[in-house]
Image: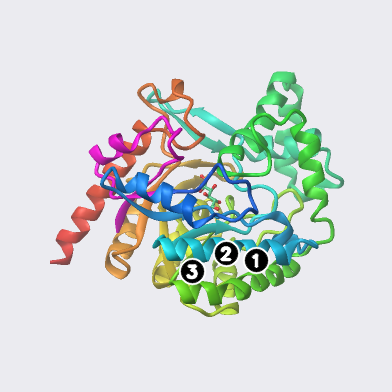
Amino acid sequence: MEKTWRWFGPKDKITLDMLRQIGVEGIVTALHHIPNGEVWTYDEIMKMKNFIESYGLRWSVVESLPVCEAIKYAGAERDSLIENYKESLANLGRAGVRTVCYNFMPVLDWARTDLEYPNPDGTSNLYFNKAEFAYFDCRILCRKDAERDYDEATLERMEKLAEGMDEDGRKRLVDNIIVKTQGFVNGNISEDELKPVEKFRELLALYEGVTRDDLRANMKYFLEAIMPVCEQWGVNMCVHPDDPPLQILGLPRIVTCDEDIEWFLSAVDNSHNGLTFCAGSLSAGAHNDVVELAKKYASRTHFAHLRICNVMPGGDFKEASHLDPRLIEVTRIFERENPSVPMRVDHAPLMLGDGEMGYNAGYSFHGRMLALGMVAGIMATVNTEKQ
Ligand code: DNO
């Protein structure tokens, strides 16, 4: 696999010079300064591409070219937004940047309740606490009938937690779930949003009455519309699985499991319609066997995210080590079945001063460097086995 790294552009504290020194071959980035829905012009794309190449690296993957909400819920602007999307794809193709990651998650891109969950060794990790998430949903968002979506045990834990909850705790949950994890991925809520909860409620309202079947139909509509451009320019689209791969906040989610993946790949059966194999997101659902999924979908994977989660009995989950046996096996499968696919790590621990650097949540330097070293070691070992 190609060793890539998610870099957030010239303002990123982690520089391309640093990345060259740690064995990174390709860069994963986006034109973060262009608002969602606007066309990425050829000139803007080339500026970024030339900048990356001036450091001896290449722009391997776009993550992400965001799909606007109106495309997902089929709003009135959907066709004009799709036209813009097609133009951006054609410009990327012409510039030779031909792997494009996106997601089809309504409103919320990814969800965690804790961004600095302490480990016994002094490092910290991202963490998803289901009871805290339920508290956010039922007591902060106050979504109608939200309680119905949680089992008894989770509601009990939520009640206990509510007893000790104060304003700081509530603010921390809002920050973690809908602000800090969203803004930097070009999500709907930016860091300077003054009323994030109100804004979030408005976004949820856009999906009232939108079912999983509707969302599937909208994804199919989008993919069918862009495939001719992808074919013309050799652009490979790769959808990121839903993180976590569960139905949350009453929103439909459609990239959560084997059946979902099979559905979107066959609904638009074109080799340019592929998957971002995010082992981490998929493993956050106890129903998914990542190793089996890797075997099944390696050939339709255009991009791999290597990390892995441990799901606890109550539904909480936590990022696990990049040396987890499941991840070793997934790496082995990709090295054998799809060795040229770009791969990156993420959601590694905060360590050795990472916490003071203000990095985007899940995108530490030392933690990711260690994780990349681990995965590179697995790859090298697997390649020895091959001979
Ligand atoms: C989180 C990321 C996601 C991913 C998008 C792709 O760390 O993996 O935000 O970039 O879902 O569109």
Residue drawn at x 49%, y 50% as measured from the top left: 44
Residue drawn at x 43%, y 65% as measured from the top left: 94
User: Mark 3 — residue?
Assistant: 274
Q: In this view, does 305 lie to the left or right of 331?
A: right
Q: CA gap, disc 2 to disc 1?
A: 6 Å
Q: Is residue 342 left or right of residue 100?
A: left
User: Mark 1 — residue?
Assistant: 83
- Mark 2 C-beta closer than 8 Å to ligand 1: no
Give the farthest residue toward the right: 144
Q: Residue 192's x, y, as percent?
A: 67, 29
Amino acid type, label 1: Glu
Report helix, strand or loop for mark 1. Answer: helix
Label 2–label 1 contact, CB within 8 A:
yes
Q: Local crowd at mark 1 within 10 Å, few (<14), some, or many (≥20)?
A: some
User: Mark 2 — residue?
Assistant: 87
The quarter of the rendered structure image containing the N terminus is: bottom left
Amino acid type, label 2: Glu
Q: CA gap, disc 3 to disc 2?
A: 20 Å
Q: Which marked residue is nearer to the observer: mark 3 or mark 2?
A: 2
